[in-house]
Image (cartoon, grey):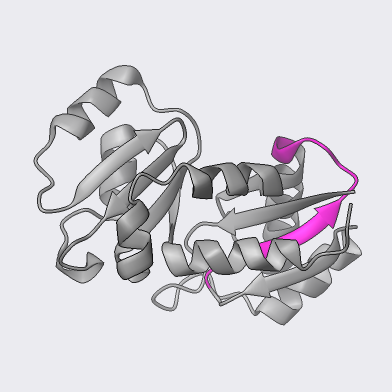
Amino acid sequence: MKSYIALLRGINVSGQKLIKMAELRLALEKAGFENLNTYIQSGNIVFQSEVSKTEDLALRIKAVILEKFGFDVSTQVLLKDELESIIAGNPFKEEVVSEPNRVLLVRLGESPDASNLKIFLEEDLSPDRVVVKGNWVYIHFPEGQAKSKLSNNLIEKRLKVSATGRNWNTVLKLSKMLDELPAN
């Protein structure tokens, strides 16, 4: 059995797509997911499954949410090993120690088109700093995310892909939650 994280996009934000985590856990347990746990209300699910394809798991979670709650929710699933690699590859090593709440990790639903990525990276986003590695965007907000013009919606618009972000404290908490799951 493998350990996974599911990242849901846009639930329980500004009163939209309201889903109680206890109800979501129950629905996913009935669908065969094991050792489920959620973190905060914004759609972070840690679980285990015998299914090995992350795409199949994402589609299954998305279908459960649509059937049970009536919402079409962008869902991305990644393996524990992938998250560990992403954490190790963070280019903002000093910032995640001194100000982890000012570092954001964004998962892109698919690889962006090279021309869209080039235009996005050439855009003046200062003082924010952006590094893209594959389907991951690392962002450092030196003045805080609230003062930034760089939002998840802007990333999706510029790169023309779905995206969902988590601050570094959440990333570390999810990693810890994965470590607490039963051994595979």
- Give the quarter of the image for residue 47: bottom right
- Give the quarter of the image for residue 27: bottom right
Residue 170 coordinates in the image, percent (x, y): 50, 68
Whether residue 43 appears in magenta in the rendering, the answer is yes
Whether residue 50 appears in magenta in the rendering, the answer is yes
Residue drawn 25% across and 48% down? 154
Q: Is residue 79 visible?
A: no
* Image vertical order of residue 22 relative to residue 8, above or below: below
How many numbered marks appear? 0
Residue 38 coordinates in the image, percent (x, y): 67, 72
Relative depth, front residue between 77 and 180? 180
Residue drawn 45% across and 30% down? 134
Q: Is residue 52 visible?
A: yes
Residue drawn 9% across and 41% down? 124
Residue 163 coordinates in the image, percent (x, y): 43, 46
Relative depth, front residue between 91 and 19? 91
Q: Which residues are magenta?
A: 42-55
Q: Is residue 167 left or right of residue 181?
A: left
Residue drawn 32% across and 19% down? 114
* Image vertical order of residue 134 relative to residue 6, above or below: above
Q: Is residue 54 left or right of residue 15?
A: right
Q: Is residue 174 left or right of residue 112?
A: right
* Image vertical order of residue 38 relative to residue 48, above or below: below
Residue 85 coordinates in the image, percent (x, y): 57, 42
Q: Is residue 157 left or right of residue 177?
A: left
Residue lying at the far top of the rendered structure: 115
